[in-house]
Image: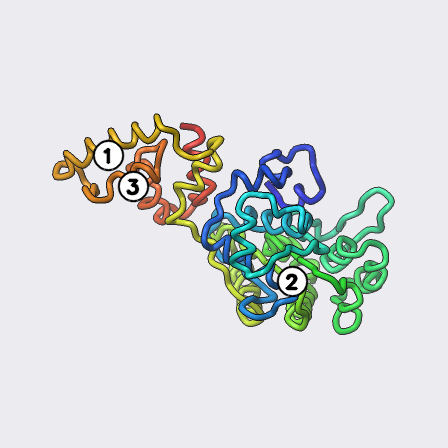
């Protein structure tokens, strides 16, 4: 699943992602996702206190970055229309605001933007650079005209030119898989100009009170060569200096994520509670013979993991950190879906 496919409305995108109400219904609002969403909503409301302009999505590969960006995309695209979706009220309460502004939104995904051909749609000008593409998404022909020369010559915009391509109202810029674009464009000499653009854009975002940027950098560490590692570290330092790192970790909330994604979940039924009680009572009676069973908390263990046995979830929690190619949340979901 790519965020850019959701933005463009591709037929291949599952309704679990393209239908925002369904997406929110099936997405568990983890603490880290709640924190990120509330801070972005505060920023879009023009509030600078207790938020940031730039967010670096820091997590292990397969740990939910794109899922988090999709949530922000739907919120910004629908504004007040999102208030009825599951979890949005919690976001508003956390952000201490009463409204979600509809924002001009741009999505740049490094795996979807060709470094040579750029992008062009029917009746649209060719955008050869990330700044040309972002300008087009934010303001169409008028915004693109401000950076058309920079796009043609591959030179990053700055100062007044950059400001003129950006809307004055609430704005959200989502950037995913940046390292893939940098790696593919390195031999073409695009790297330095992209870094200049990213730095200029981050600094401009910091100077505004209603512009938020969310940046996801990596592909898997195992796929990085020395140049990739250098560029990854450079982007991370830039993001850390100009913004805030958000650790999209959900280790303690994995059970609820699994249930929301794999099942039509509407809480535990009476039959489910009876099953949980029976298993927990047996485990408590045999707690001295069983490993990892706390008699006082065994019922909550079974309840939080149902319909899976706690030992199944525990295997993933203990083992995934030692498997470098295991894609964390995504990998757990795929394996349990097969089961």
User: Which residue is farthest front?
Assistant: 98
* Residue for point 29% across, 41% down: 300
Vertical placement of residue 83 versus 216, above or below: above
Disc on the earlier residue, 1 or 3: 1
Residue marked by disc 1:
280
In the image, 102 versus 55, the foreground residue is: 102
Q: Residue 275 in the image: x percent, y percent? A: 30, 28
Q: How far apart are the two marked residues, 1 and 3, measured between alpha carbons?
A: 9 Å
Give 208 or 79, whichever is nearer the viewer.
Answer: 79
Q: Is residue 288 left or right of residue 92?
A: left
In this rendering, position of residue 31 left or right of residue 151: left
Mark number displayed over residue 2 = none
Question: Residue 243: x and y, percent?
Answer: 56, 68
Disc 1 is placed on an element classified as: helix
Please tell me which residue is depicted at 42% across the width and 50% down the height of the picture.
250
Q: Nearer the N terminus, badge 3 or badge 2?
A: 2
Disc 3 target residue:
300
Question: Alpha-carbon neighbours of circle 2 within 10 Å: few (<14), some, or many (≥20)?
Answer: many
Between the residue at mark 2 and the residue at mark 1, the CA separation in whole angstroms equals 47 Å
Q: Is the residue 203 above or below the residue 275 in the image?
A: below
- Specify the quadrant that holds the C terminus: top left
Question: Residue 45: which disc?
Answer: 2
Task: Give the Cα separation between the discs numbered 3 and 2.
Answer: 39 Å
Residue 123 placement: quadrant:
top right
């Amino acid at each position: 699943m790519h965020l850019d496919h959701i933005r463009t409305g591709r037929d291949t995108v599952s309704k679990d992602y393209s239908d925002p109400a369904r997406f929110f219904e099936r997405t568990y609002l983890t603490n880290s996702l709640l924190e990120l969403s509330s801070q972005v909503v505060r920023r879009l409301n023009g509030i600078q206190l207790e938020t940031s302009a730039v967010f670096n999505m820091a997590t292990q590969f397969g740990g939910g970055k794109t899922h988090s960006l999709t949530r922000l995309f739907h919120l910004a695209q629908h504004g007040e229309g999102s208030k009825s979706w599951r979890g949005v009220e919690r976001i508003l309460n956390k952000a201490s605001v009463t409204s979600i502004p509809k924002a001009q939104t741009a999505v740049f995904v490094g795996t979807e933007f060709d470094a040579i051909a750029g992008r062009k749609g029917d009746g649209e000008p060719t955008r050869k650079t990330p700044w040309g593409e972002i300008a087009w998404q934010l303001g169409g022909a008028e915004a693109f005209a401000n950076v058309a020369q920079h796009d043609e010559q591959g030179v990053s915009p700055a100062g007044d030119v950059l400001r003129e391509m950006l809307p004055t109202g609430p704005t959200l810029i989502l950037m995913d898989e940046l390292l893939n674009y940098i790696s593919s464009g390195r031999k073409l000499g695009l790297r330095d100009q992209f870094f200049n653009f990213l730095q200029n854009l981050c600094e401009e975002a910091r100077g505004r009170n209603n512009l938020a940027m969310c940046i996801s950098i990596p592909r898997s560490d195992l796929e990085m060569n020395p140049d990739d590692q250098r560029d990854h570290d450079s982007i991370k330092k830039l993001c850390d200096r100009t913004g805030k790192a958000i650790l999209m970790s959900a280790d303690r909330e994995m059970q609820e994520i699994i249930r929301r994604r794999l099942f039509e979940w509407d809480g535990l039924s009476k039959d489910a509670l009876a099953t949980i009680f029976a298993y927990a009572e047996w485990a408590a009676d045999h707690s001295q013979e069983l490993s990892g069973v706390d008699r006082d908390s065994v019922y909550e263990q079974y309840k939080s993991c149902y319909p899976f046995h706690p030992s199944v979830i525990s295997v993933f929690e203990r083992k995934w950190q030692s498997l470098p190619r295991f894609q964390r949340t995504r990998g757990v979901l795929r394996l349990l879906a097969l089961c």
